[in-house]
Image (spheres, coloured by chain):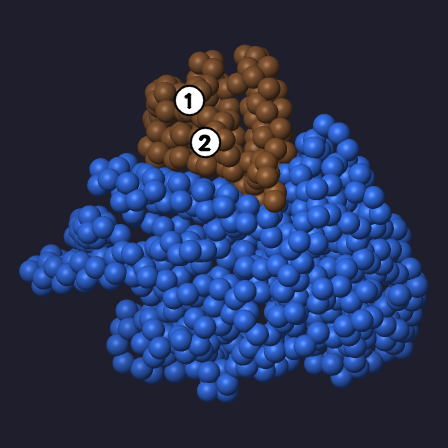
Amino acid sequence: MRLHPLSIPYRAVAGSANLGTLVFLGTLIGSGSLDPTGLSFLGLLVGYLVLMGGYQVVYYRRFEYVLADGSLDITSGVVSRRQREIPLGRVQNVDVSQNPVQRAIGIAAVRIETAGGGDTEAVLKYVGRDRARALQRELGGSGRDSRDRIPGGATDGTATGAGQETGTGETAGRPEETVIFELPTRNLALLSLFTIDPGAGAISSAVAALSSGGDPQNVFMLRGVIDRLPGGTLQAVVLVVAIVAVAAWLLSVVLTFARYYGFRLVRVGDELEYERGLLQRHSGTIPMEKVQTLSVHENVLKRRFGYATLAVETAGYGPSSGGGGSESAVPLAERDRVLSIAERIEGVEDPEIERPPRRARQRYAVRFGTAVAVLAGVAYAGATRVAFVPDPGTNYWLAVLGVLGLALVGAHLRWTNRGHATTDDHFVSRTGFWARTTRIVPYFRVQTVADTRTVFQRRRRLASVTADTASSRTIGGGGATAIDVDDGEADRLREVLRSRLRERLADRRIRRPGSRRRDPTGPGTVHGTGDRDTDPDVSRSSGADVGGSSTSDVDGTAGADVDGSSRSDVDGAAGADDRGTPWIDVPDDGEDDGRAEDGPERGDLEGDDPERGDPEDDDGSGR
Amino acid sequence: MERLDPRVRFVWVVGATVSATLLGVVVTVALRFLDRSLLWAGPALAAVIVVLGGIHAVYRYRRWRFELEDDAVYIERGVLTHVRTVVPYVRVQHVDTQRGPTERAVGLAKVVVYTAGSRQADVSIPGLTPDRADALQERLRRMAIESEPDDAV
């Protein structure tokens, strides 16, 4: 398949209309060496467009992609040819975006993310809108066998069951779509008003700096206004900062509004699909079986009004989310609603959060208090000794006392908003007062468990326990950390996480039909055949249940083999690889997934051998 | 629980010395331009870092422990911050052995265990003899393979 023909002119123009070229042209024209009205300029322009156009035509003709046999093969490149094969099993997210121009001409960009964070694995610029949606379906998982493993360092071929996608595509057509959440306008307004977009702050500061032309009071060229206002330098500085902040906020409002306009979250088969955007339209897939961590964000304002945000983290890089690996599943909704959606996605009930012991509160009080005291002392010494400001006298110290009081309140607030919980299937941690974040990690997603004790924690018999996951979220890390828990509790948590991980993995292994144990020394033996027949409903039930009891869909009957079978990988180098992604049995109501008796066997992950006719094949041939 | 080879302390001290030297050079060069009378500060700083590094290395060696348990690798380490890490075999992606120049000179190796985690993605066990490192790598590989429970039914 090829890209959309309109991508040729679009790429030719859009590629050149970037900042660098414009600046270059701008300087040339500005300095007089290039006359925009002259024939030579026109000639140059035409020549350039012809060249660019020619290049894009060649690019178009050399760009081919094929979706077959369990992988997406892309051949591209004008000067240096490149061939890339992406096993469908490795695909984490498929993101489709369209800016207004692209929408007008009907093309879209498709970005395919795989696990391991980092860059987008493949980008198709540009395909037709319908084709983009179709690709999203087929690559995303509703059309394919959602068996997947997230490979780690080893990039051995991991394909999903090949026959699957075509099979389902033909028989089931498009699986039923259940709308989980649509962002009401009111929420969108609130979200825009109350979200601080970090990018907006940076942009605002940059623009302020550039527009001031070096004069700090001339930000946004408002010198005239600032000069007229009463007060001295201090007031002017405060005012400037306030102006920049307000500008940042306004920009943030606009950006957030444009970003989340028309947000919709639907569930299609095993996947969550979201759509959003005013100018730049994004749509992406969040495969349920790839969800590593859920996080609920409730900053102070949201808490006050009873709202919350739900974000879903996968192991793939999320280009549209900016933070990497994390995507808003519910940008803003009432807290109860958010929790119930979280339950639908991950089966997590509202956990009972255990606070850290009181000693922890003392610790924060001491910490904040010391910080205040030190700062006050330094400020005092600095002002009186260095800057020779006259001694401020008792007022200053009273003010310091006041701030100390605030510090104590702060310590208490930090303590009340911190905690952890261990439910049947999830490990939950919560922290933060201004931006309270509750992170929910299913036990079977836990990678490593670590507990740390700093010197100060040791003195108070406290510890912090972290359950790491494969989520590729860059800021804040992937897993969940229970901060400042009691020493003994930390030990217990470590053991609980470890044993529950084991148990859940074992559960998933058992539920998977046809799971067999691999004999590392010889050709694989299949015990599976019988199992598959005896437990057909366990795995199949997940198939039938598309929209209904979502909890059982994802977690329970997913019958996923998280990675036990991957363990049986004979080729040691790759080791275990799956990050615990369950192999959700094909949600195609009971029909054979076209694979051999060994069922959803890891063997199928071998990229080169998707149609395993005989079970003996899994002697690690592909791995 | 297993401990590291005592020679690893030497490796750590050498590491500290290298950093100290670099820092000392940088500081000395900077001071040359700023205030020549303080020129002694560079080497002094370097010496302090080496001494601290040495002390740290000793304590670090004392704290380092690891064990291959039934289902995971358990590691205890850390001087100022005590860290205890559990790496389940099922989560092991692959295992490397690494030998830096100092390690090679002293005759040691390091085993690095990679997982898919985002924070503690790779866990390393330094200060192993090459044989021990190879054996550990092999054992981890086997444990990882066999970590599927015996009875899948």
Q: Quadrant of residue A49?
A: bottom right
Q: Is residue B112 left or right of residue A412?
A: right
The three-letter amino acid code for the residue at tag 2 is Tyr
Establish if A126 lies above or below A562: below
Q: Is residue A186 visible?
A: yes
Which label belongs to residue B74?
A: 2
Chain B: drawing colour: brown
Q: Secondary structure at mark 2?
A: strand
How dense is the environment of label 1, judged by Cα within 10 Å: few (below 14), some, or many (20 and up)?
few
The three-letter amino acid code for the residue at tag 1 is Met
At 37% from the left edge and 75% from the top edge, which residue is drawn? A302
The chain letter of the blue chain reads A
Of all residues, the one furthest to the bottom in this rendering is: A185
**Tag 1, which chain?**
B
Which label belongs to residue B1?
A: 1
At 58% from the left edge and 65% from the top edge, which residue is drawn? A553
Q: Is residue A117 left or right of residue A402?
A: right
